[in-house]
Image (cartoon, rainbow, N blue to C red):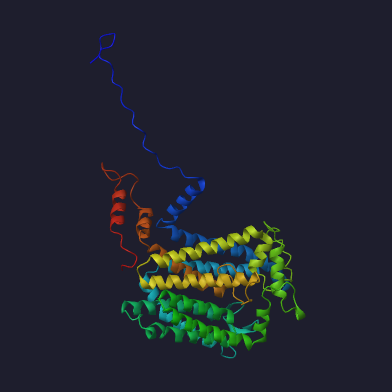
Amino acid sequence: MSSSRTGRPPVQRAVRRPAAPGPRRQNPLQRLHTRARKAWDRPLTAYYLILGGSLLITVLGLVMVYSASQIKALQMSLPGSYFFRKQLLAAALGAGLLLAASRMPVKLHRALAYPILAGAVFLMALVQVPGIGMSVNGNQNWISVGGPFQLQPSEFGKLALVLWGADLLARKQDKKLLAQWKHMLVPLVPVAFMLLGLIMLGGDMGTAIILTAILFGLLWLAGAPTRLFVGVLSIAALIGLLLIKTSPNRMARLQCIGATDPGPGDSCWQAVHGIYALASGGIFGSGLGASVEKWGQLPEAHTDFIFAVTGEELGLAGTLSVLALFAALGYAGIRVAGRTEDPFVRYAAGGVTTWVTAQAVINIGAVLGLLPIAGVPLPLFSYGGSALLPTMFAIGLLIAFAREEPGARAALAMRQPRFGRKRGAGGPQGPRRWNTMRRRASVARPSGER
């Protein structure tokens, strides 16, 4: 070994190794996509989307009902806040129903299916009794419950079909009977047709379309074969076409799709002025309360066409916000139905999601001139206590089901306060509540286990 001039052995230099390749950096869009996927995969995402989205839609709906109904109330020699106060009372009652439904166990929901169905059928038959049933806008589907309050039993028929149909299909799936088409159709389809018949006796085709959508949603979730699904759809389409052909009013509504002129006799007045309201809103609208169309030009501004007033006062930004809230609500409902192991929860969650999204699409499509005016309100948004109460109860069902997702129960248990225990107490091994959380998380049961 050669030595250096100082007599010391030379220092051996370490051989440099090539640096290991680091993690690949993501661009901002990829990072945003990754964070969004992580947030969506959290166990409580659907729970918060359903709870927050439904509350935001309801609160914004109250604001727009107050704005859109003032002129109508003054024209009827009523206080300007008349319709708003009635809607606020219905929203308070609906919040109680939502809270009760979100806290009920699944067994109690299934037990309520038959009483709700029987009550809905009784009330829908009572509508046709002279002296009890009332006609509103040509439809005989209302019952007066005293004073200014009226009840539309067909709205509760939607909830009845969802609960009863989900319980029926779940019991048949447990017995492995859904592989036979007769067990899949009977008695689900006959009972649904009975409800449709009672609704059509009053002439309310809009609600009948929503009920049909719920029926098809349940059949699709039950795994109906394509030929069976197409067969039932063809029969329903044929009946609907016959009902439209035999009614001049329905034919006139069908002819107003895409209309830009009121036409002879102002037959498309409502559809055209709904487009006028949306077109005059611009990006950010004319301002809350500054709508022009609600001054007698746009019929049903606070009920069926409240989305048009929203577009005029809040602009494109407001309407897109409403659409985003409904999209989030529908997406969360699909996630709840897809992740559960309980067949009843899957059918009920799918039925409620089909109900809310189909009704929103039909209402908004009519306002945009893409669909015929069906006379159905925008869920949780339009004025109408009869529609708001069962819808909020149905949203409570979704919240209860979202709490039963895998991991959601454990995550909620971790966030519950432990009363009577000081923070940090638990001895030298750290706070006892963390041990409790781990124990709860480790024994969490799947959503379908009861």
On screen, residue 410 versus residue 31, left or right, reads: left
Q: Residue at x 49, y 76 (%)?
A: 214
In the image, is residue 414 above or below residue 145? above
On screen, residue 118 versus residue 173, left or right, reads: right
Which of the pair 239/72 is nearer the observer? 239
Q: Position of residue 405 (x, y in %)?
A: 38, 62
Q: Residue at x 39, y 69 (%)?
A: 104
Total numbered circles: 0
Q: Position of residue 195 (x, y in %)?
A: 50, 84
Which of the pair 337/194 is nearer the observer? 337
Residue situated furthest bottom in the rendering = 130
Residue situated furthest top in the rendering = 6
Whether residue 62 appears in this view of the structure is yes
Which of the pair 366/124 is nearer the observer? 366
Q: Position of residue 309 (x, y in %)?
A: 67, 65
Whether residue 100 appears in this view of the structure is no
Residue situated furthest left in the rendering = 1
Q: Quadrant of the C terminus?
A: bottom left
Q: Quadrant of the N terminus?
A: top left
On screen, residue 425 versus residue 300, left or right, reads: left
In the image, is residue 174 above or below residue 243? above
Q: Position of residue 312 (x, y in %)?
A: 69, 63
Residue situated furthest right in the rendering = 264
Q: Residue at x 67, y 68 (%)?
A: 69
Q: Residue at x 37, y 73 (%)?
A: 108
